[in-house]
Amino acid sequence: MNPFRKADFSKVGVVLDALYYSISFDEGKQPYWSLLESLFIEKARLVHARGDDYVTMELEEFISSFMKQHRMGAYKSFHESELNRVDENYGSIHHAFSTYQARFTTDDGKGEARGINSIQLVFEDNRWWITSLIWIDEDKNNPVPARYLPGS
């Protein structure tokens, strides 16, 4: 069941809640791909920043890559949630710096990750659309700055 079927996407927070919901899934299930697709403009870009390197893709490539990893058992379950968010808005553009925490199960056991999603949105047709999403995972050499954690 899609709890966002009649959601009010004129609110950025609702769009981001739907984003996190759409990519989370329990073991034996799939992410909610149709919901994810409904949040992005056509030709939106997703970028996974990894230190001095990055991978850029369109939404369809991201879904295809994730589905392949899922079929191969890379992720048996995956739950990502927002820990904190810093918002900036001007007219019909919005930027959200969203600190996330992910918990997942793989063939090797359980794992956790934390990092930041940089999400850009545009307001059109009485709702917010994601135009691009860049994310970077925290590591021991690059911890999430305290100002982007809860309570700051």
Image: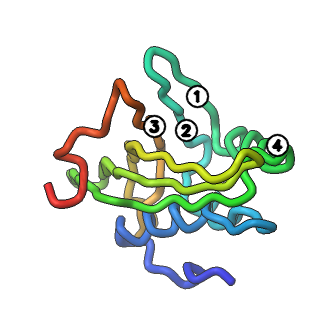
**Percent from the top left, x then y, of residue 28?**
81, 67
Which is more N-terminal, label 3 or label 1? 1
Q: Is residue 22 left or right of residue 126?
A: right
Q: Which mark is residue 56?
A: 1
Which residue sits furthest top?
52
When the figure is inspected, residue 114 is found, relative to residue 37, above or below; the finding is above
CA distance separating discs 1 and 3? 15 Å
Under mark 1, the amino acid is Thr
Which is more N-terminal, label 2 or label 1? 2
Marks 1 and 2 close (CB-CB < 8 Å): yes
Q: In front here: 114 or 21?
A: 114
Give the structural element (helix, strand or loop) at label 4.
helix
CA distance separating discs 3 and 2? 14 Å
Q: Which mark is residue 46?
A: 2
Which is more N-terminal, label 4 or label 3? 4
**Percent from the top left, x then y, of residue 130?**
47, 52
Which is more N-terminal, label 2 or label 3? 2
Under mark 3, the amino acid is Asp
Under mark 4, the amino acid is Lys
Marks 4 and 1 close (CB-CB < 8 Å): no
Residue drawn at the location 45% of the way across and 68% of the way down? 17
Disc 3 residue crowd, few under 14, some 14–19, many 20+, Cα 10 Å: many
